[in-house]
Amino acid sequence: MSAAHDNTREYVTLSIGSQTFGVSVTDIQDVFAVHSITPVPLSRPEIAGVLNLRGRIVTAIDARSRLGLAPREDHVRAAMAVGVERNGEAFGLIIDSVGEVLKLASNTFEPNPINLDPRWAVVSRGVHRLKERLLVILDIDRMLDLGQTAQAA
Amino acid sequence: MDDLLSEFLTETAESLEVIDSELVRFEQDPNDQETLNAIFRLVHTIKGTCGFLGLPRLEAVAHAGETLLGKFRDRELPVTADAVTLVLEAIDRIKEILQGLEAAGAEPSGHDRPLIARLEAAACGGMESAAPAAHQAATPVKVASKPEPAAPIQSAVLGEPKSREEAEALGIRWDADLGRALRPGEVSLAELEAAFQSAVGPGANLPGVSSAVPAADTGEEEDFARGARSSESAIASQTIRVTVDVLENLMTTVSELVLTRNQLLQMVRQLDDSEFKAPLQRLSNITAELQDAVMKTRMQPIGNAWKKLPRIVRDAAHDLKKKIELRMEGEQTELDRQVLELIKDPLTHMIRNSCDHGLESAADRAAKGKPETGVINLRAYHEGGHIIIQIADDGAGLNTVRIREKIISQGLASHADAMAMTDAQIHRHIFAPGFSTAAQVTNMSGRGVGMDVVRTNVEAIGGTIDLTSAPNRGTTFTIKIPLTLAIVSALIVGARKSRFAVPQSSVVELVRTGKGCQHQVETINNTKVLRLRDRLLPLVELADVLGLGGAAQRGTSFVIVMQAGGQQFGMVVDDVFDTEEIVVKPLSSLLRDLRMLSGATILGDGTVIMIVDPNGVSQNVGALAGDALREEQAAAASAQSQERQSLLLFRAGGPEPKAVPLSLVTRLEEIPVSQIERADGRLVLQYRGKLMPITCAAPDGEIRTEGKQPILVFTQGRKLMGLAVDEIVDIVYERLEFGLTSERPGLLGTAVLKGAATDVLDTAHFLRLADPSWFRDEPAQQAMVRTRALLIDPNPFFRSMLQPLLMAAGYDVEAVEGPEAAQKLIAAGIQFDVMLTDSETEAEVAKLTSADPRLAECPRLVLTNDAPSGAVSAVAKTDRLALIAALDTMMSQQGAAA
């Protein structure tokens, strides 16, 4: 019984572009719809802006931009975001939509294929082979780490 | 950690700060019995509590210090500087132990024996002539033991017996409770305890006190302690200790409440007649009161940040062998705790600076006919929503000559610029990074991380710093900081489609400009200015500063006159909406390096907007103003010397020298070859957090294979390019006279520089090689249709120099030699969006245009061979960046008007 517990993990599935990703449920705080977002002038392109989430200012990072994908074109449905807290600061990762919660065993998991785009490889922990699709497991910390020095100049 | 222990730590930390300053005061006035009593009481309390908590190291040190202080108090010992130094040393040791205690929860290991021995020696030193038992005799509590013989004074100096056996062998009594031998004049704890138990002393009235103060060894001290305790308890019943976290939390909650109230107010404002109005007004008032009250809990007198200063000044005076007096005024001036914490270090640094650099030695002062003792005046007072802190010394003043030399030697300004600066401008350079004029690096300052750190810290909290200095009269620094950082009054402005908050504290006034307004924005060589009363105000456009792009929607705009970063300037915005009290929320770490923005806030309607940092913007103006100034001066200089300019000479791909105008080069670097990488078929370098493409100046395009590669760095906005050369040779300041022009790409022509034929590189060519989009700046991108320009210049060289340059900047260019040729083209039906004419042919062209309606509308840019003279918007041909910038602006204005 305990062995089974040790081997399964719960993931929230997210879709970004045409790909489905998984994020460990323990990594995220909440999921919310993004209604209005204030762009931050002069900030890095991956930063979509800041938004007000229940009185807190959340720095929103555009997952598409982070993964080198084209910007979202669906302007009808509001984008979704997963809320994360790091070092007392609130971040939101803007994604296309949120799917379901899956319990996955470790026997379907394998490390990143070596030919994965380096931009993806740094933020991916590995891949779960599901029956009908592949689930790329996102490392939220890596997604949020845009490199502190890049704007220093 | 134990509650008791943490309480003790907080309390003791506070006491120690007081002791520091009190001791210094005491040293100056040894007859001040009251101060001494206060010090004594504090040390005594520390010692007593230590014993209670079982902290033997602390107790031992405190005890030894107290003994020495006791001698002062009883006038058995004269108060000497050395003795005070010794006591201060003991205080420092106590602090050290406390720090360890705080970190680890237990006393750190270490040896205090030598210090204690010295303290005791000092205490005993005064006893030799006095009766050995004088101290003891004063006690009303009759301790049932005889005074110890005063014999082993030396043993105290040489080290104490380590064990009972050793002690007994020496004839000294051993105390098992203390775990050490008893010192002259000391009784064992057990005996003392017994005496307390049996005596009808003050302890009888205060049950439990006697055990709480186990180490009290005279009744007089007991009285002290009791007196202190009763007055303390009176205060204690009126104050409670609350952790800062609780206050911070309260503050955040109140901030949220303020926001919610604002939201409600906004909603109700839209209703004409609402029953909510009256109660909401009341809620609003109460919220405001609550906000005030909470703010008050965060306020602390600035004196708290000054407590350490007397000690620092004393030690500095001691080390530097100067005589310094610190006068403090306005210690009660209150400001936000957070601000207080942030200015503590800068203040300390500045006081040290004043001691070290500001004030002269006693001998020097005497020679100048000044009093030997130098005075540092520290003053704080409120002014508006700010607190002003002044640090004034009556020293030698800043050494203008030396700073000027330093400015030149550090390359912060050219020789000519530095010579033209006023004294005040020169003085301000001490705030430049890495600037230190100290001839020698001393213990306390002169390490080159001085005033710029102070300035950075002050500006980080929205403050400003300025100075005035007069030779031999001294230097005065003035720091202006906001009282609080949490809630500020802000002006909500609009730039393009976004709203921004501008802290009201930096706003001086608002001016409306544009069509039908009294004020108009004017331009001088592409620099915007505003005529305001009897002076010109430099302007920056907020949208430009923030890189928002796009053009203003309407003909009118607002100029916010701001005072920040030591200068006044105007910030052009499209709209001004409202003033609002906003709660400043810090930006996340990912956004913290944006200098133009200081935070974000949530408005009444729930939207998040960014707060503009006036200091960041002012630096932008400064850069612009500096450029304009340099251009002016360069122009003036070139007028005198016929287009002389600074050229960088280097070698690349051959022994013959090559040159580029120095004004185009941002930086010279030598980079280890190993750091240069290859990507996408070209050379790149990770430079200051960005990827910089590298092109080779040599035609064969090879960089070095080992060692260091010299690189010229070109920047424009966010774009970077490195030009690899073989060797940097020299910088010359000469007239650039092309002997030969070149058809070869990448070469403008050949000129004689320093007597040698030198190829002058076409920088534009290399910039394009590195980054094809280099010249496609925003204005050019906007104009998807290429703008057609007509260049009229009789000089073929300039035609061939300017044509590719303009084309690179996104213009289609027809170059002709004179008005006749131009007329032919126009007659042929070619339409031009802009004309560039040489100043010499300008008059003829003007005739032509006034005759031809097709040309009357066409804007003209006048180009000159030398400095811009009286002609409106005249640009020097040789200054390609200014030329392109002027053209772009002209076109974008044209576009906006159309």
Image (cartoon, coloured by chain):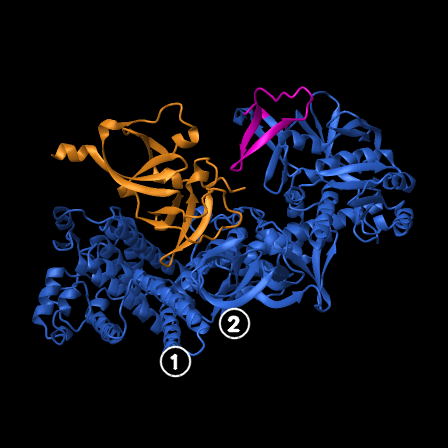
* Disc 1: which residue: B278
Residue toward you, B245 or B491: B491
Q: Residue at x 60, y 38 (%)?
A: B719
Residue toward you, A107 or B251: A107
Task: Tell me the kind of residue under disc 1.
Answer: Ala
Disc 1/disc 2 C-alpha distance (Å): 31 Å
x, y percent for residue A30? 31, 49
Which quarter of the rendered picture does the N terminus of chain B lie within? bottom left
Q: Colour of chain B?
A: blue
Q: Which residues are magenta?
A: B680-708
Q: Residue at x 15, y 69 (%)?
A: B209
Q: Which labelled disc corresponds to residue B384?
A: 2
Please give the chain letter of the residue carrying mark 1.
B
Please give the chain letter of the residue carrying mark 2.
B
Residue B629 in view of the camera: no
Q: Is residue B688 left or right of residue B602?
A: right
x, y percent for residue B415? 72, 46
Residue toward you, B218 or A57: A57
Task: Tell me the kind of residue under disc 2.
Answer: Gly
Q: Tag count in the figure? A: 2
Q: Is residue B189 above or below residue B452?
A: below
Which SS class for mark 1? helix
Q: Earlier in the sequence, mark 1 or mark 2?
A: 1
Q: Quadrant of residue B529?
A: bottom right
* Magenta highlight on residue B748: no
Q: Colour of chain A?
A: orange
Q: Is residue B214 left or right of residue B873?
A: left
* Magenta highlight on residue B689: yes
Q: Is residue B335 left or right of residue B222?
A: right
Q: Is residue A126 left or right of residue A38?
A: left
Q: Residue at x 51, y 42 (%)?
A: A151
Q: Quadrant of residue B566?
A: bottom right
